[in-house]
Image (cartoon, coloured by chain):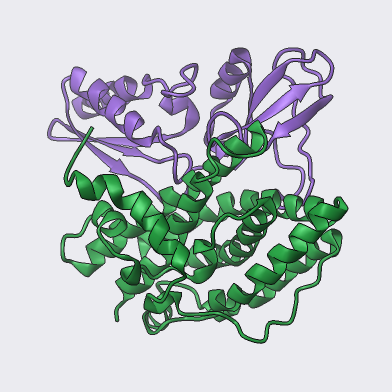
Amino acid sequence: MVSAETLTQKAAWNAAAAVPDPEVPCVTVADLGILRWIRVVNGMAVAGVTPTYSGCPATLAIEMSIEAALRDAGFDVRIERVLTPAWTTDWITEEGREKLRAYGIAPPEEATGSVRALFGETTVTCPKCDSTDTEKLSEFGSTACKAHYRCRACAEPFDYFKCI
Amino acid sequence: MAVHDAILEVADDCLVLGHRLSEWCGHAPMLEEDLALPNMALDLIGTARVLYDRAGALEGKGRSEDDMAYLRDEREYRNCLLVERPNGDFAQTMLRQLFFAAFMHPFWQAAQSSKDEVIAGVAGKAVKELAYHIRHAGEWVVRLGDGTEESAVRMQAALLALSIYVEELFESSPAAQEAEAAGILPERAAMRAAFDATIAEVFTQAGLDMPEVTFPQTGGRTGLHGEGLGHMLAEMQSVHRSCPGVTW
């Protein structure tokens, strides 16, 4: 027997979870692990949202989209910004990683060494041709969460979702 | 002096350096750096925003992050002198970044166990970001220090110009001491071993030696700044001050 409360909770989660990331619209806030939780109390949906990077300019846009989606689903909404624990790329779901790859963005790879190691290179697989013969062009890419790479095999430049 | 003043010091460090880095936007020598420097500026400004918000809440006078950033004058800024140094050439920008990141990385690492939940949260994020800053700046210091004759001369000049501001990073103001005693912020002096190790690793590859500093410069935490900060703030605050309360 599923209680009414569980159903409402589920409806709220489904509404919020479907919100796409404004800068990487192929994945949702749930795929990225940015939407941490939803609690529904007396018709008020409280959503816990965590920023990816301290200065991520999309943070506010994401919170507003989640708020709008929940309002459309008939809830009163409050957004809580969750800072602890800090977001990590480990929270990107398997489905999210696949969606990123299909979109042309290499998903984060398990860090092979310290990110602080000078001139250290992470082996990144090309999302187009699966070659591991790739090179880093820039540690910092089009958004704070991405680095810029190029595939030596198929010559395609691509974004890499940095491991953090 | 109170704990919120100590948080303000850290916030000012992050905002001032973040703004300095943002000055490279559109001027960097190559597109990759034009993306990298504003990206790091965003990390720092994002950190500053949360810290201003927290300092304002603890102060209890209703000051917002905008009030903190845009409505305080030069003498009210509590940043250390290193971060306000003008960008100069790439050698100076990168060495300044390395010094700051080499200090702040262990600082945030320790601050993750702060008794203040917000500080601990900020720290958890910043420590990951600063690791990238160390690598990025460290690689440039090696490239330039161990590069051409010209780049080595410039890196050496940057080292002489900036090393006098390093000591201030380890100084705790009375406000910082209070925050340290309360377990809100980590003890600044305790970062020395980690800082030295990072710098030694980079300098060995870059062919640089930390010069002996006879007269370390200090005063930022009491509001005594170099000429450059006033100019920077005048530019940074001009829109907010000429159109108070404007939104878009």
Residue B72 vs A118, above or below: the answer is below
Q: Is residue A159 left or right of residue B48?
A: right
User: For residue B156, which quarter of the picture?
Assistant: bottom right
Residue occupying the point 55% across, 20% down: A95
Q: Hue of chain B?
A: green
Foreground residue, A27 or B247? Answer: B247
Residue occupying the point 51% across, 81% down: B171
Residue A145 in the image: state x and y as whole percent. 55, 35
Q: Is residue B170 left or right of residue A134?
A: left
Q: Hue of chain A?
A: purple
Q: Quadrant of the N terminus of chain A?
A: top left
Say whether residue B198 is visible.
no
Residue occupying the point 84% across, 24% down: A133
Q: Is residue A43 left or right of residue B207?
A: left
User: For residue B223, which quarter of the picture?
Assistant: bottom left
Residue A21 in the image: state x and y as whole percent. 43, 24
Foreground residue, A5 or B216? Answer: B216
Foreground residue, A118 or B243? Answer: B243
Count the marks: how many? 0
Q: Quadrant of the C terminus of chain A?
A: top right
Residue A30 in the image: state x and y as whole percent. 43, 27
Say whether residue A147 is visible.
yes
Q: Is residue B167 left or right of residue B248?
A: right
Foreground residue, A73 or A54? Answer: A54
Q: Which residue sits furthest left?
A: A42
Residue A33 vs A94, above or below: the answer is below
Residue A33 in the image: state x and y as whole percent. 46, 33
